[in-house]
Image (cartoon, grey):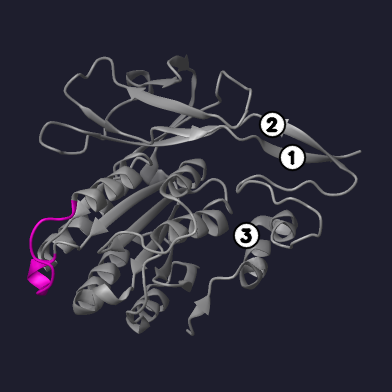
Amino acid sequence: MNKRRWLSACLSLGLFALGGPAAARAQQPKPAEQKPPAGQEPQEPGQAVVERTVNVRLPVSVVNKSNGFVTDLKQPDFEIYEDKTKQEIESFVALSDLPLDVAVLMDTSNSVKPKLKFEKDAAVSFLQTMLTSRRDRALFATFDSEIELHQDFTNRIDLLSKAIDKVKARGETRLYDAIFRVCEEKMFAVQGRRRAMVILTDGDDTVSEHELKDAIDIAQRSETVVFVISTKAGGFFGVQAGMVDAKEDKVLKRVAEETGGRAFFTGSVLQLEKSFTAIAQELRSQYMISYSPANDKFDGKFRQIEVRLPGFKDLKIRAKRGYTALPRAVTANK
């Protein structure tokens, strides 16, 4: 499959198929009309906007002292707080029962050339492990000086493997732009699916137009759990042996932890493979908890989320730490 530049115009047909006419119309620029925030549909002429209650979905991982996943908890074991106010849980399901959309983003900037082959092999192995159900899908994109979609959502390993095999390293690093673009274009599109992003990178962002906070915000609002695998300390690969830079370490950890995921820092092929295995295991071991916020004033402010297990003090919880409360709108004819 030929590589495609990631342009909204090129994706409009796919969005029409996934999200219907409204999603396709949202991709068409209109003069003198301000683009709404990602995840919020635009108002059409002759229609009134009616705000609807937002249902917040939380993928939640629980681990014990040995870092083993705890998968036998029930809804009454959990409590959800938003801005310190307890919320009523409306839905509680095992996440493995829901279809999965996973976006694999690979850093293909110049610095990854010595280790690109190992990263490709590990990515293919991960997808073979994850896509065990026909309902599960993955896409593959790369980022360097450009952001490119090589393979859209599919459950066909052969198409994904072919796309991964063809990529080459070049240019700089647009990490934040890649997270933002994939979430904006792909992770809002279809409801009723769990969403995850796996990012393979060896360095800090260098040329993005978006900031770190923008990338985290849109991942939280699109309910996308972000996992990051850093290969910066890749002594096994014969490059940059030693400690990971503290600033880059904190940035990658922040992206992952604030969206409910994890960051891994690898220094060998074995560690790289173990990181992918750990991500696959976690995605199969999470809970999905949903609630409608007691505060129905969606004013664009950030809201903190806390998940508690009152009867289990020795367990550790991973979930996104909050979201920006933007209204989602439906339209009605005037």
Left or right: residue 2 compared with residue 77: right
Upstream in the sequence, badge 2 or badge 3? 3
Considering the numbered disc 1 on the image, is that residue within a helix, a strand or a loop?
A: strand
Q: In the rendered image of this protein, does residue 193 appear above or below residue 117?
A: above
Tell me what residue is drawn at x 14 percent, y 38 percent.
Answer: 67
Tell me what residue is drawn at x 29 percent, y 63 percent.
Answer: 201
- Residue 100: which numbered mark, if any? none
The quadrant in which the C terminus is found is: top right
Snapshot quadrant of residue 46? top right
Mark 1 touching mark 2, by CB under 8 A? yes
Task: Give the residues in magenta.
Answer: 234-245
Tell me what residue is drawn at x 10 percent, y 56 percent.
Answer: 243
Q: Which residue is mark 1?
A: 330
The residues tagged by marks 2 and 3 sit, at their Cα atoms, a distance apart of 21 Å
Point out residue 81 in the picture as x, y percentages from the top left corner.
Answer: 42, 20
Dot 1: few (<14), some (14–19), or many (≥20) neighbours within 10 Å?
Answer: some
Which residue type carries mark 2? Answer: Arg
Q: In the rendered image of this protein, does residue 297 appear above or below residue 206?
A: above
> Is residue 61 covered in magenta?
no
Nearer to the camera, 71 or 55: 55
Snapshot quadrant of residue 232? bottom left
Upstream in the sequence, badge 1 or badge 2? 2
Which residue type carries mark 3? Answer: Leu
Q: In the rendered image of this protein, does residue 207 appear above or below residue 59?
A: below
Tell me what residue is drawn at x 46 percent, y 72 percent.
Answer: 146
Q: Which residue is mark 2?
A: 52
Query: Is residue 133 visible to the viewer in this orientation of the structure?
Result: yes
The residues tagged by marks 1 and 3 sit, at their Cα atoms, a distance apart of 18 Å
- Residue 18: which numbered mark, if any? 3
Which residue type carries mark 1? Answer: Val
Dot 2: few (<14), some (14–19), or many (≥20) neighbours within 10 Å?
Answer: few
User: What's the magenta bit mostly, secondary-structure-wise?
Assistant: loop
